[in-house]
Amino acid sequence: MGEKMNNKKWKFEVTEQMLVIVNRDWSRTYVASIHTQLSHDGDKIYSAKCDLRNSSIVCFASDKNQLSNKMDELATLIEDRISLQVPENNPVIAGSQCSMN
């Protein structure tokens, strides 16, 4: 029984979250999950994943301030620059529109 309890405990992890703001507009905010990992040198590496309306972004950085700035910039690029309309000539595979990239 002791082994089963130990195995269950490692599956649960408390994650830190960060607010991602698109172009300093408080009406367009998203929540990103931050994960901390150790590199081979023993330094901390921070990674974050944020789900936007029609996509997700992932970013890596050496500190949380840099991570926050990168996530805000990526979210701004996606929200302001990429069109939400899918071109008509993209193929449909298994019910979803696919890109030719």
Image: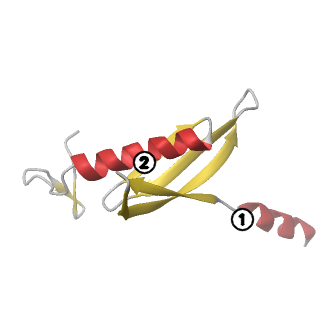
Residue farthest bottom in this picture: 1
Q: Position of residue 43 (x, y in %)?
A: 72, 32
Residue farthest top in this picture: 41
Q: Residues within 10 Å of mark 2 (few under 14, many from 20)?
A: some
Residue farthest left in this picture: 88
Asked which colour scheme the image uses, the reply is secondary structure
Mark in front: 2 vs 1: 2
Q: Which residue is mark 1?
A: 12
Viewer-proximal residue among 10 and 54? 54
Q: Which residue is mark 2?
A: 72
Residue at position x 38%, y 53% in the image: 24
Q: Please state if 86 lies on the left or on the right of 66 as rendered.
A: left
Mark 1, secondary structure of its residue? loop
Q: Please state if 99 lies on the left or on the right of 74 as rendered.
A: left
The quadrant of the picture occupied by the N terminus is bottom right
As shown in the figure, which amino acid type bears the numbered disc 1?
A: Phe
Please, is residue 17 above or below residue 74 in the view? below
As shown in the figure, which amino acid type bears the numbered disc 2?
A: Asp
Viewer-proximal residue among 60 and 99? 60
Q: Residues within 10 Å of mark 1 (few under 14, many from 20)?
A: few
Viewer-proximal residue among 7 and 62? 62
Inter-mark Cα distance, 2 to 1: 28 Å
Please, is residue 32 above or below residue 63 in the view? below
Please, is residue 46 above or below residue 88 in the view? above
Mark 2, secondary structure of its residue? helix
